[in-house]
Amino acid sequence: MEMGWCSDHGLPHSALLEWDQEDRAKLHAHLIEESTRCVMCGTKDWEWEENKFAYMAQEKTCQGCYLKHMASEEGDSLPGTTYELVVYDSALIEKQRLRYEQAIMQRHVNESGGNGQRGLRGHTHR
C-alpha cells in the first residue's frame, strides 16, 4: 500500500519511513478509505446509504476517449489492439482533424438515414 502511494507521488519509500507514526497512520487510513471507492463511478457505499439521491448521472464526453473510439471503429483491427493518444506533428494533426470532420459528417449522414439531405459530391437534392 505504501509503495504504491510512494510510486504514484514520486516519493522514495525511505522518505515515507521517516514520517512520524501519526502521519503514516493517517496516510494508511486515507488509502484504506479510498480503496472502498467504486472503480466505475468513484462513489462509496456510505454516500448512498446517507442519501439515495446524492448524485445524478450527467453525460460527459471526453474528447480523447471519443478519438480512441473513432479510431477503433475505422479499421479492421486485430483482437487485442488498443489505441493510445499521442502528440502528432502539425501535418499529422491536420490530417487527423480532416478525418475527424469526415467521420462526423458521415455519422450525420448515417443517422439522418441518407434522407436526401445531401447527394453525390455534396449537392443538395431538390
Image (cartoon, rainbow, N blue to C red):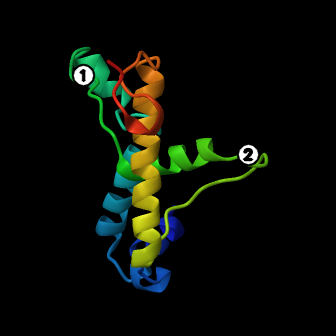
Residue 32 x %, y %:
43, 48
Above or below, 68 relative to 86: above
Residue 15 x %, y %:
41, 85
Residue placed most toward the observer, 125 or 64: 125
Above or below, 112 relative to 68: above
Residue in the image at 44% along x and 75% along y: 91
Above or below, 90 relative to 74: below
Going by the numbered disc 1, the residue's amino acid type is Met
Q: Residues within 10 Å of mark 1 (few under 14, many from 20)?
A: few
Q: Spatial distance from mark 1 to mark 2, Cα to Cα?
A: 37 Å
Disc sitting over residue 25 in the figure: none
Residue in the image at 39% along x and 34% along y: 41
Q: Is residue 61 left or right of residue 50?
A: right
Disc sitting over residue 56 in the figure: 1
Can residue 37 be seen by looking at this rendering?
Answer: no
Instruction: List the residue tagged with mark 2.
Output: 76
Residue 112 x %, y %:
40, 19
Q: Is residue 113 left or right of residue 57?
A: right
Residue in the image at 46% along x and 64% along y: 95
Residue in the image at 34% along x and 78% along y: 19
